[in-house]
Amino acid sequence: MILDFKFQPHKSDSQLETCNSPKVNSMRREWITKEGSRILTLFFCGWGMDERAVQHVKGKGDLLLFYDYRDISGEEAPEVEGYESVRVVAWSMGVWAASVLLSRWNIPVSYRVAINGTERPVDEHYGIHPKIYLLTERGMTEQGRDKFFARMLSGKEEIERFEENKPCRDIDEQRDELRLIREQSVREMSEMHWDRVYISEGDVIFPVENQRNWWRNRVEIITLSGGHYPFYVLDNWEKIWK
């Protein structure tokens, strides 16, 4: 039986309100739904995010979310035995992280989808230009973070709505994550097969042309409306596969 799932926070209300992040540098993983489904979705989130980024996205099956890529060197594969289908969705910097980790993990994946990102996240031609990336990194204050979030959204309505999806993470660790993704991505440069790629036509975070430069002649590309954050358009996991 395949069960509909709903977001189920694993933290107490007091933790959600105070945004106390655990003092760890390793990648974090959260079981959003684990109900014995036959289908498992592995979702690799974008930079600076947490499970709130997709708490409104509906669908079927179990859902395991990964985020915080300050150190992905020692990550062990999730347990996927018993699932008939394992599907991967990766967004933004999660595309790079998924490519690196899945190349190590050797787990059976039936379908892979990349959204608004590439396997070369900091790159003049295929990702975010290194100079722009460094400026973003150096300007990552709380005010700079708010400006970044506004730029990845499409219009006032999305900006207001994103208050419900805004991550509850410490600015210092987010700044560190930016730096450490840049440093790791120079050393870790994997490539793998993807089945589908979505590119938002209004993405001003991850340049659209650079995304197309990377994915052209590799995989089916589908153009979305909106900005870098796509989950008010792709608001159901089943939409992503169909």
Image (cartoon, grey):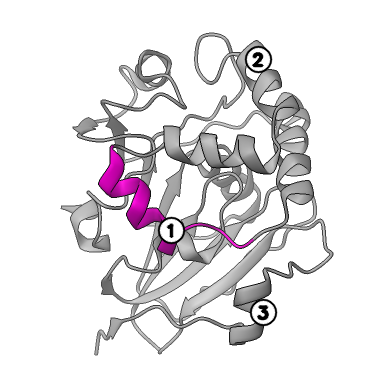
Seen from this angle, which residue lies furthest left?
242
Dot 1: element: helix
Question: Which amino acid, by three-letter code, is at mark 1?
Answer: Glu
In the rendered structure, find residue 15 and report the number of the disc placed on it: 3
Label 1 crowd bin: few (<14), some (14–19), many (20+), radius 10 Å: few
Dot 3: element: helix
In the rendered structure, find residue 87 and report the number of the disc placed on it: none
> Relative to 159, does residue 17 appear above or below in the rendering?
below
Magenta span dominant secondary structure = helix
Label 2 or label 3, whichever comes before in sequence order: 3
Residue 46 relative to residue 100: left or right: left
Q: How many marks?
A: 3
Q: Position of residue 81 (x, y in %)?
A: 51, 77
**Which contiguous range is marked in magenta?**
155-168
CA–CA distance between discs 2 and 3? 35 Å
> Relative to 163, does residue 208 appear above or below in the rendering?
above
Residue drawn at x 34%, y 24% as measured from the top left: 218
Question: Which amino acid, by three-letter code, is at mark 2?
Answer: Pro
Residue 141 relative to residue 81: left or right: right
Answer whether labels 3 and 1 touch (C-beta < 8 Å).
no
In the rendered structure, find residue 130 and report the number of the disc placed on it: 2
> Relative to 83, does residue 154 appear above or below in the rendering?
above
> Relative to 54, does residue 69 appear above or below in the rendering?
above
